[in-house]
Image: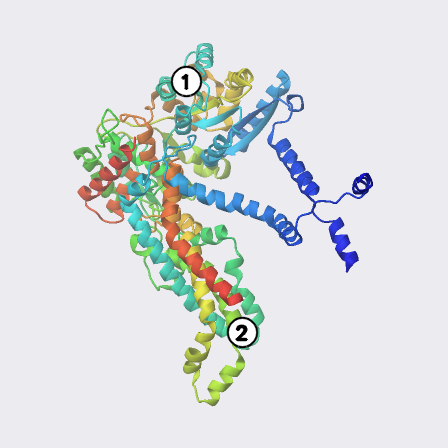
Amino acid sequence: MTLAIDQERQNPKRWRLPGGFRIKLFAYALVAPVIILILALVAYPFLFAIWVSFTDQVIGSVGQFVGFKNFEYLAGTATFWSAIWNTVTIVLVSDGLKLIIGLGLALLVHQKFPGRGIFRSFLMLPWAMPAFVAFLTWRVLYQPIGGGINLILTQTGIYPQVVDWLGQRSTAMGSVIVASVWRGFPFWFVSLLAALQSVPKELYEAAIVDGANVWQRFWSVTVPGILPVIIVTTLLSSIWTANGFEHVWLLTAGGPSDATMVFPVLAFFGMQTQRIGEAAAVSVYMLPVLAILVLFATSLMMRKED
Amino acid sequence: MTETSDTKNKSGWSRRRVLTTAASGLALAAASGFPMPAIAQTKKLTYWGGLIFSDDANKLLSDTITAWGAANGVETEVVMINQNETVQKVSAAVSSNTMPDALDVGLDLLLLLSRQGVFSTLDDLYKKIGDAQGGWFEGPDRASDTTAAAGGRTGIPFGVNGNLLLRRKDLLEPAGFTEAPKTWEELVTQAVAINKAPVSGLGLALSNVGDANVQVNVLQSYGGRIADDAGKKVTIKSEETRAYLTWLKDAWDKGLFAPGNTTWDGAGDNQAYLSGQVGFIANTGSVGIAAKKDDPELYDGSAFSPLPAGPKGTISPITPNLRAITKASAMQDEAKALIEHLSSPDFMNAYFNVAIYGPVLKNQQQLPAFDGSNPILTGLLGLAQAGTAPAYPDVYNSAWADFSSNFIVPKMCQRVVVDGWDFDKAMDEAQTQGQAIYDKY
């Protein structure tokens, strides 16, 4: 007995976790820092913003829970409804135009012609330019006095009157959309070009053998082939456009009147009044729509990867 | 196979290793979470200065604080904060308990944070500085009184600013106008005389920016009010407001306003004046400083005067800029001494010369900076002496600040001139929106 105890002391049995559990634990330990980071940097601010939207928090105070008061107040303002209409308009029109321009250019560049590489790089320039610089440049171009667009129109005699592009309700939204499309179309172009290049040539050859003309080949081969990319690009671009701040802020700051007011600018005005709760409520109003778009885009992209 | 298993077991996660690792992690976390021993901490006075357009002014403030620290054995750190970002920076600092010991702050933020108990009361220092320099001007004295909100004064004013009327005398004098316009009607008359492309008569902003809130002053000078004397019931819709809108629409229909003024950003009027596109602007004087430096010819052709009057008089509000001390600061005495030093005549004279603030103390009007050689500073001296309190004749309260930040009056103007709404409809919307804001307080 004594001998057995001595032997055990000399060669103690180490308590060990079961093998499978050990591997799992090790795996969890490896990903734990990333999970903690995601929780701290994504989940916490996200949930905190939602909480703040239900409080009357101003700078320097924690704020009290006020239920839906911030949301009711916002819904009672005319500017809020203008922001909804304008945000929807900008998203639909600018993304529609980006699709048409991006697809048209992608189809063009998909063909072989001299200088194609340079032309392709040239088309990416608007995207490479910082948004701040791009939209300030557009602001200068739109200037009533000395602005490039008015100079061209008046000097060439196309339109002799000086137009206050950003200062009139009738032209402000269109002007914002044009600048926004200019900055955003390269993303569509490059996405759709990549999609076009992935459509098997055999399908086109088979369609030609079947006697399909160009238009039929486009609708029956090209469009089905790039449709998943179009959908994902549309969703991503819609999210970015709806969340976009700089294009409206730098061009019109939401004016004239509320002609170009959109949700992100409205939220920024809320911050300026130092009422954090209301500013958060503006953003939270957008959340359900954007969340659905994000879920759709994510699921489509994952399905595509599978 | 056996060897591999053994190797794995040897390097595997035993209970002891799991517990040791956990304990080490906890110890590390605890060590990083707790403050270091006092002996390892250095006592430093942190000051957040308001970064303004003048590099000379920023450098002077920073150097003066550093020199004061060196002379008094106080380690100092000066951080210059862009005034446009003060709200965001201070907001984050309050939330994370990382406020500086002392800072430059605007009146709105001072009032808001004073209600939250963020700042120390400084009545003794306020009295000491005032007594030493002939007393405070009435405008900044009344405007900076936070007693009702915080039980005492929490800010020491160091300069005032407000709008002056800047005009192109080089264009107006040939047209027969040698004097500044005394009334808003006269302003329109003079603007008509010089309103020939590419110059627009009026460079007044009507967009969603702070500069456009000068329209509130015009409205008030016509007798209009934002709210009643209790500061509760909004009273925008009135015959006086209608009279003001009539003046505005008339000027608009005459084509006097510069194109683009309904979407200008904060620098819109500055740029319009400096590029020679407008005849008049209402501005704090920064445009004059810029013109003096970059376009001396334009500067020589410009003149400064108080804002014109309406039928009910002149409304020309002053905005005091203040220094405050954080209540949580461990260096209250040092911070007070620093602020007292920054109020000294020598420093302020040098500072006034490079910044664009008017005086706050009566003795400051005898400083060389205000000897009349600088027309901008002369204008600001006049503003300090005769300017109206913020919001006057309305009540300056949180609802007023919120109302102003929402640009309700500029938006009412836009409804009339951009959307073509009739006066009643525009006033109704402003009335409703304004009351919704006032009802929150």
On screen, residue A55 above or below B366: below
Q: Quadrant of residue B130?
A: top left
Q: Which chain carries label 2?
A: A
Closer mark to the observer between disc 1 and disc 2: 2
Label ID, residue B434: none
Quadrant (top left, top right, bottom left, bottom right) of the C terminus of chain B: top left
Q: Residue at 49% across / 28% down in the picture? A: B355
How crowded pointer 2 is (Cα within 10 Å; few <14, some 14-19, many 20+) is rated as few
Q: Mark 1 lies on which chain?
A: B
Visible residue check, residue A150:
no
Q: Residue at 48% across / 30% down in the picture? A: B94
On screen, residue A212 above or below B59: below
- Viewer-closest of B389 and A306: A306
- Describe residue A46's horizontal placement relative to residue B232 as left or right: right
On screen, residue B363 above or below B2: above
Residue B227 in the image: state x and y as whole percent: 24, 30
Total labels drawn: 2
Label ID, residue B153: 1
Helix, strand or loop status at disc 1: loop
Helix, strand or loop status at disc 2: helix
- Viewer-closest of B37 and B137: B37
Residue A7 in the image: state x and y as whole percent: 81, 42
Quadrant (top left, top right, bottom left, bottom right) of the N terminus of chain B: bottom right
Visible residue check, residue B12:
yes
**Residue on which the image places disc 2:** A198
Residue type, label 1: Arg
Residue type, label 2: Ser
- Viewer-closest of B326 and A75: A75
Residue B5 in the image: state x and y as whole percent: 75, 56
Residues under labels 1 and 2: Cα distance?
71 Å
Discs 1 and 2 carry the same chain letter: no
- Viewer-closest of B52 and B49: B49
